[in-house]
Image (tube, helix red, strand yellow):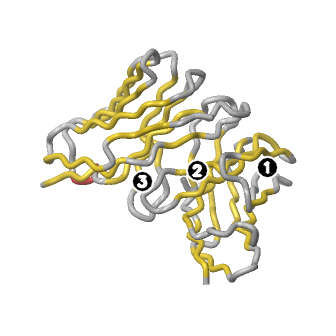
């Protein structure tokens, strides 16, 4: 099955600076990579996703890059704000049975320092 | 997402008891999923269903059962065979075609009495 590794587990940045979270995956057949933001006790919310036919996608302050050859993808947040503080999860599409089950990384706790 | 409703929000289970978690969606999504989240961990797939009357095991299906009798509903039963059921359970749905985004409900927190 798929295995997703996510780093770092905790990331502390000054407000206004950029944050980068990195993930690697093992299954070369994986072709869909979403990122979720989860606040304490709340549901994960999809913030951006990328499919394997593109290398980069942007949405305002958020961008995701994908390197299929190296099997890694990254989340970039620019001009960080206090409301960006949360746990961020990367995921890769589960290729074990034809459906869209996702394999998640263990999460990155992003802390925005004022 | 307002279209996915999980209930109850909190649930307590006694030893040897089966409990059922509810998940309903009004998004007309074909596919539905159950994930388990332990503290400080990512989500792990329990079961998924692409269509009514069909479902597949995920990575950690042992001790759980599901049914999909209606498109809108995908209940999860945590059986007494699941020896460590304390976790946050999240239901999700998607349009069902490959690589469509999954959207989550608010979750059910299950604890052992």
- Chain letter of the residue beneath label 3 in the structure image: A
Q: Position of residue A67 (x, y in %)?
A: 41, 19
Q: Which mark is residue A107?
A: none
Report crowding for label 3: few under 14, some 14 to 19, many 20 or more residues within 10 A (C-alpha): some
Report crowding for label 1: few under 14, some 14 to 19, many 20 or more residues within 10 A (C-alpha): many
- Whether A94 is drawn above or below B71: the answer is above
What residue does disc 1 label?
B71
Choose between B19 and A82: the one closer to the eye: B19
Residue at the (53%, 36%) spot, across then down: A3
Q: Position of residue B40 (x, y in %)?
A: 42, 58
Choose between B39 and A49: the one closer to the eye: B39
Sequence-wise, the earlier of marks 2 and 1 is 2
Secondary structure state at the residue bearing disc 1: loop
Choose between A63 and B81: the one closer to the eye: B81
- Chain letter of the residue beneath label 1 in the structure image: B
What residue does disc 2 label?
B44
């Amino acid at each position: 099955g798929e295995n997703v590794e996510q780093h770092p587990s905790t990331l502390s940045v000054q407000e206004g600076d950029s944050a980068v979270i990195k993930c690697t995956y093992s299954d070369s057949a994986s072709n869909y990579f979403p990122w979720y933001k989860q606040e304490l006790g709340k549901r994960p919310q999809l913030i951006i996703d990328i499919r394997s036919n593109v290398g980069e996608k942007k949405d305002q302050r958020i961008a995701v890059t994908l390197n299929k050859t190296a099997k890694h993808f990254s989340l970039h947040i620019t001009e960080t704000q206090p409301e960006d503080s949360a746990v961020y999860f990367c995921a890769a599409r589960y290729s074990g049975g034809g459906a869209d089950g996702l394999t998640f990384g263990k999460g990155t706790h992003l802390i925005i320092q004022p | 997402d307002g279209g996915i409703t999980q209930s109850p929000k909190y649930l307590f289970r006694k030893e040897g008891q089966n409990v059922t978690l509810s998940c309903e969606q009004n998004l007309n999504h074909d596919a539905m999923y159950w994930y388990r989240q332990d503290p400080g961990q990512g989500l792990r797939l329990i079961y998924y269903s692409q269509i009514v009357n069909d479902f597949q095991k995920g990575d950690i299906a042992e001790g759980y059962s599901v049914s999909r009798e209606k498109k809108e509903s995908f209940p999860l039963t945590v059986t007494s065979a699941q020896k460590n059921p304390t976790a946050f359970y999240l239901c999700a749905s998607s349009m069902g075609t490959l690589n469509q985004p999954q959207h989550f409900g608010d979750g059910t927190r299950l604890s052992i009495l």
